[in-house]
Image: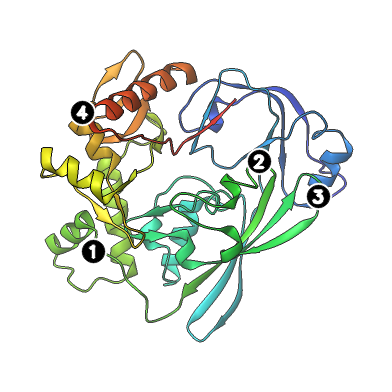
Amino acid sequence: MNPTQKPLILNGVELRSMNTFGVSSVAPLFSEIKSVEELHFLREKGFFDHSLPFVLGGGSNVLFSEKLTRPILKAGMKGVKILSARDGIVRVEVQAGEQWPALVEWAVQKNLGGLENLALIPGTAGAAPIQNIGAYGVELKDLFESLNWTGFSNFSERTFTAEECAFGYRDSIFKQELKGAGIVTSIVLRLTRENHTLNYHYKPLREYLEQRGELKPDIRRIFEAVVSVRQSKLPDPAVTGNAGSFFKNPMISEKQFNEIAELYPEVPGYPDESGFVKVPAAWLIEKAGWKGKRAGETGTWDKQALVIVNHGRAGASEILDFATGIQKDIKEKFGIDLSPEVNVIR
């Protein structure tokens, strides 16, 4: 740590510009770190004395309550470094504060495969493993090697392998046993230099590519397809406040799926190896009549029912009330519990 550039500890910081929902919220304490060493400085200054902080990345998967009780610690570490390149595999270390969309573009420009399906997912590299981000048939765990993490109890550093991260669907150990217990400082990914495994079987991607005569696309074309499809369906947070998919796609039993299919033969379902069936939450919400619905300053996006948007100056309580209304209706109509993907921070 440069002794002349110690992190500031600020009181009463407004977070509207630091979350993609665009909600107003005040942090009692706030600091941004650029290195692991700066954590120890904050510790000496009492930043962690009263309450463990919430670690903020890009603010793209959170909903802040109007007045927070927890400090906010922003991960500002930067840097991307190639660790090794052999046998067709390139190992890349990425600091936690790097913006995820920029990282994907960097990889595509260097013809490094693996990240292209994860284009335009907002947020930072440090936040990516916490919920095992995924899109269009690819999850972070598919190309993940390890991460470095510092715990808030004793401020010791630890490396987690993919197995130790216990990745699941939008889940990891950092959303379970170690939730809020520390900070991811960097991640290591394994990308391909050649013989890329391409995944473009998701219907919108396949249709986009086929319409353009791309029958054997490379990673650049898949990246462009993902960007185009996402932009056509999802609102730009810079224009309309949102946190992407508000709910997880529910996993239900085969028996329950068959019961729903008797009433709605068109219901999409994706069986997994554990015997459960994943049902798109967007289909359930749209079928229940919530797509494009608005209540005050809150509503669902008219092109993607899974996205709850802030049309203006909605606060967390208004957004949560709207989301709860959706959950209750889906439970009544389908007998399915929708779980939020967005983290609600109080």
Task: Estimate how packed mark 2 is, as few (under 14), some (14 to 19) or many (20 or more) residues with alpha carbons within 10 Å.
Answer: some
Q: Which mark is residue 155?
A: 3
Q: Residue at x 33, y 36 (%)?
A: 235
Q: What is the secondary structure assignment of the residue under circle 4?
A: loop
Q: Which residue is mark 2?
A: 180
- Give the image quarter of residue 159: bottom right
Q: Nearer the viewer, mark 1 or mark 4?
A: 4
Disc assigned to residue 138: none
- Answer whether residue 188 is visible to the viewer in this image: no
Give the secondary structure at mark 1: loop
Q: Position of residue 209 (x, y in %)?
A: 19, 62
- In this rendering, which labeled residue sits more in front, label 4 or label 3? 4
User: On the rendered structure, is 159 left or right of 261?
Assistant: right
Q: Nearer the viewer, residue 281 or 97?
A: 281
Kind of residue sitting beneath label 2: Gly
- Seen from the viewer's position, the closer of residues 112 and 184 is 184
Residue receiving disc 4: 288
Amino acid type at mark 4: Ala
Which residue: 19% across, 56% down?
A: 203
Q: CA distance from mark 4 to mark 3?
A: 48 Å
The structure residue drawn at horizontal position 35% and vertical position 74%, both measured from the top left corner, is 197
Amino acid type indicated by mark 1: His
Q: Which mark is residue 201?
A: 1
Residue at the image position 50 percent from the left and 23 percent from the top: 23
